[in-house]
Image (cartoon, rainbow, N blue to C red):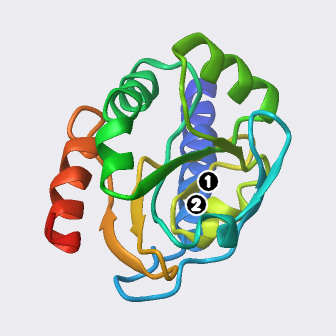
Amino acid sequence: MSKWWWVVLAVSAVGLLLAWRSAAQARAAPEVGASAPALALPDQAGKVRHIEDFRGKWLVLYFYPKDDTPGCTREACMFRDDWQKLDALGAQIAGVSVDNALSHAAFARKYHLPFPLLADAGGEVAARYGSLRDFGLFKFAQRNTFLIDPQGRVMRVYLGASTSKNSREIIEDLKKLTGM
């Protein structure tokens, strides 16, 4: 065999190992009706937010891969543009990624985001929500959204959420769930 064959074989083996590791670490997303998993994460201003801070109102908790990338920007701006509609339905929004608080601050400032972005640098919270992809050298949050009721129960789960439709889907579901 040529030397290149061994390189291809080695790279393939590493890729399979990383894929297996990611699949083995993947947790299931919380089910509808379950209590929302705990969180204690700093927002873009450095204030630590807890899941209990959001009680009493609906919470749109959305996980996204990376600040200031095309899909993540589109999704954040859709939530920004629909923020008043969601607020009128009694909902607040919080975004979560594995980016740090400084990155979140720049992203929120650049796009005038009126809601907190939570820094889950270690990916622990994303993992609790079944939304972490860990490839060893890098981690990112999957694009999943959880609609949590005022008592802290997961009422809707949007796996692989659409960047352009997610906020509208949530508005429609909130109208049904609240009777508005």
Instruction: Determine which residue is flagged by label 2.
Output: 22
Number of other residues with Cα within 10 Å of mark 2, as a class: few under 14, some 14 to 19, many 20 or more: some
Q: In the figure, is residue 33 to the left or right of 138? A: left
On screen, residue 146 above or below 168 = below
* Front of the two marks 2 and 1: 2
The N terminus lies in which quarter of the figure?
top right
Number of dots carrying numbers: 2
- Using the rendered image of the protein, determine whether residue 7 is visible from the camera's viewpoint: yes
On screen, residue 122 above or below 12 = below
**Near-viewer residue (13 or 86):** 86
Instruction: Determine which residue is flagged by label 1.
Output: 18
Residue 13 horizontal/vertical position (percent): 59, 50
On screen, residue 164 above or below 177 = above
- Using the rendered image of the protein, determine whether residue 62 is visible from the camera's viewpoint: no
Residue 55 horizontal/vertical position (percent): 58, 72
Q: Amino acid at mark 1?
A: Leu
Instruction: Name the residue: 68% across, 73% down.
Output: 52
Q: Residue furthest top?
A: 110
Task: Determine the secondary structure under disc 2.
Answer: helix
**Near-viewer residue (69 or 167):** 167
Q: Amino acid at mark 2?
A: Ser
Instruction: Name the residue: 52% across, 86% down.
Output: 35
Q: In the figure, is residue 155 to the left or right of 121? A: left
Q: Are marks 2 and 1 in contact (CB under 8 Å)?
A: yes
